Every structure is written in structure tokens, then in C-alpha cells.
Amino acid sequence: MRVEIWSDIACPFCYIGKRSFDEALARFEHADDVEVIWRSYQLGPGMPKEISGDIYDVLAAKYGGTREQAREMNGRVAAAAEAVGLDCDFDSIQPTNTLDAHRLVQLAAAAGRQGEAEELLFEAYFRDGLNVSHASVLERISAVLGLDRGDVAELLEGDGFSQQVADEQEQANELGISAVPTFVFDRASAVQGAQSSDLLLEALRTAWNSSTASSQTGPT
């Protein structure tokens, strides 16, 4: 069974959703037969790599509210993250364009390290307050992943995987995905949002049973 997860590095709900999905998959009876693919989705494709304000300024401008409202909203998100064992330091977040981070995830996929790349990028952005568009940050993460230094340098100096990132965003649009995270099971069913591990486990089991029933029935 294939599970595709549309996600953005700068989305706290995607970080929470990943933790819940990881827990659900660890409890799933057929986990070894599940292929997990992380798909790129940029919530702010027009975001510059460097901005003068902080995350509260960005959110206030995006939603038309105040800095205090943005701070209160992030306080609730931080509490939700803490509930699943995540540490998010919103005061230290450096808002940035996530294209290069997504391109690194695509490169990591070829080495079978895509999920780990997502986790390290989430940690860098939400926990460590690092700018995930900076080459030095991406190089450091690449080293932890054991990616080839030459491949990483070529990626960061060029535009490798940029088209794939754009294509996956377009795929999301075609599938009617307008918010992340979205978990798609065999392109037959989907779950959206930072759901609980119990709900995601139920979705895995339902999708598996449906897939198994279809394969057993076969063409008539």
C-alpha cells in the first residue's frame, strides 16, 4: 500500500501530523508493506528567503489580524505540538521560502532517507530556529543524512528538483488538496489535518482492507 503525504516544512500542523502518523504506522500490523512518499506543497511559494519581521508579523499580515492574535494562535499550536511530544519555539522561527528544503527532501528520497529529511528539517525550523533556506543549514542536515556532498553542492548551486516540487504541488491541486498535511492512501481515500494517531491508524487499516478486498476480487 502506498501513502502519499503532502506537507510543507513551515507548517506546524504537518510536523504534528508527521509525529501522529509515525506513531500510527508503528502500530500498524502491515507497516512493512507500506510505502510512504512525502510530497512537496509550499504554503508560501512567494515567500522570500530573508524577511525583516518574525513569524507573528508574517501571520498577522497573512490573516489580517494583529501580532497578539498571531501569538495567541501559535500558543495553541505549541500546546498541541507539546501534547504529542514536540518542542516548538515560535519566538525563534525564521520564516523563509521552503523551496530549497523541499528540493533537499527530493534528493534524500533517492537515498531512502526522505522521512528522516522531513524530520530534521522540521526540527531545524520549529525547534532550533534555523533558516531552512540557508545552504549551511541544508548542508548540515545533508551530512546527518549521509547524502553525497557533491550531489548536495550541485543541488544547492542549481535548480535540481524544482520542477518536481512544482509538479507535486500541481498534483495536489488536481486531487483537490488545498491544505496540509493531507494523507492519501493508494489514491483512493484521504485524511486531512493534524489528526490523532488513533484516527490515522484506523485510516491505514481501512485503506489496507479495501486494497486487499480489491486484489482478492480481481477482474471478472
Image (cartoon, rainbow, N blue to C red):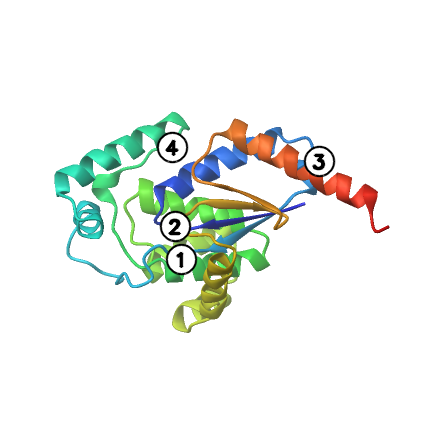
Q: Residue at x 39, y 45 (%)?
A: 122
Residue 143 screen position, x and y as percent: 46, 54
Three-letter amino acid code of the residue under disc 1: Ala
Query: Tag 2 or tag 3, which sits nearer the N-term?
Result: 2
Image disc number at residue 101: 1
154 or 47: nearer the eye? 47
Q: How many marks?
A: 4
Measured Cα–Cα span from mark 3 to mark 4? 31 Å
C-alpha distance separating marks 3 and 2: 31 Å
- Determine which residue is flagged by label 4: 86
Mark 2 residue element? loop
**Which is more N-terminal, label 4 or label 3?**
4
Residue 134 x, y percent position in the rendering: 31, 60
- CA gap between label 2 and label 1 equals 7 Å
Reply above or below: 179 against 127.
below
Q: Secondary structure at mark 1?
A: helix
Q: Residues within 10 Å of mark 4 (few under 14, many from 20)?
A: some
Question: Which residue corresponds to mark 3?
Answer: 209
Q: Secondary structure at mark 3?
A: helix
Mark 4 or 1, nearer chain start: 4
In this view, the mark in front (3 or 4):
3
The residue nearer to you, when weighing 141 against 56, is 56
Q: Is residue 73 left or right of residue 183?
A: left
**Which residue has dot 2 on it?**
9
> Which residue type carries mark 4?
Leu
Circles 2 and 1 in contact, beta carbons < 8 Å: yes
Location of the N terminus by quadrant is top right
The kind of residue on which mark 2 rests is Ile
